Image (cartoon, helix red, strand yellow):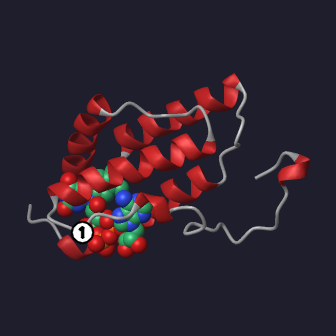
Amino acid sequence: KLGNETIKAELGRAAWKLLHTTMARFPDSPTADESSALKSYIHLFQRLYPCGECAEHFGQILGDYPPQVSSRSAAAAWACHVHNKVNESLGKDMFDCANIGDFYDCGCADEEKEGMN
Ligand code: FAD
């Protein structure tokens, strides 16, 4: 069956947006349980990613670059790096990971003091 590149790209943009925004909201000092949850989330994101070809490719990248879940900054830098690996394989421009700081905003009120997302 012939794939549809436009729909695949749209799915990719939505998925990356969710992934990077999740990293941007991850705690600076996560508990062991929070780190474990993020690690599981990333592995399940890969396993269940709707585009099978993409999932397989991303699985190889995860094998080379295991998820970094010790802090918000480590997780955000890791996600930027693996997205760049995908960019590279698709012949796209590299994103400057030094600029990721406030690029991904969830648009939610700051509820961090209450320990909520
Ligand atoms: P995208 O790569 O979707 O990026 C969206 C926006 O994020 C960019 O416009 C930019 O503002 C920002 N951005 C770019 N790079 C980074 C970065 N490193 N860190 C943070 N933000 C960044 N497509 C395929 O054809 N084959 C595949 O094998 C494939 N594998 C994929 C695997 C995964 C896990 C995902 C989520 C997507 C995959 N895709 C794949 C889709 C592909 O990565 C793109 O999403 C799609 O081609 C649309 O690209 P885009 O140029 O619009 O920008």
* Furthest residue toward right: 114
* Furthest residue toward front: 98
Q: Secondary structure at mark 1?
A: loop
- Give percent across and percent down for residue 43: 42, 34
- Give percent across and percent down for residue 41: 52, 38
Residue name at image x 75 percent, y 53 percent? 117
Q: Is residue 77 above or below residue 18?
A: above
Residue name at image x 23 percent, y 47 percent? 52
- Give percent across and percent down for residue 53: 18, 49
Residue name at image x 57 percent, y 66 percent? 104
Q: Label 1: which residue?
A: 93
- Give percent across and percent down for residue 92: 20, 67
Q: Is residue 110 left or right of residue 57?
A: right
Q: Is residue 71 above or below residue 31?
A: below
Disc 1 crowd rating (10 Å Cα; few below 14, some 14-19, many 20+) is few
Residue name at image x 67 percent, y 32 percent? 34
Whether the residue carrying mark 1 lies under 8 Å from ligand 1 is answered with yes
Q: Is residue 4 visible?
A: yes
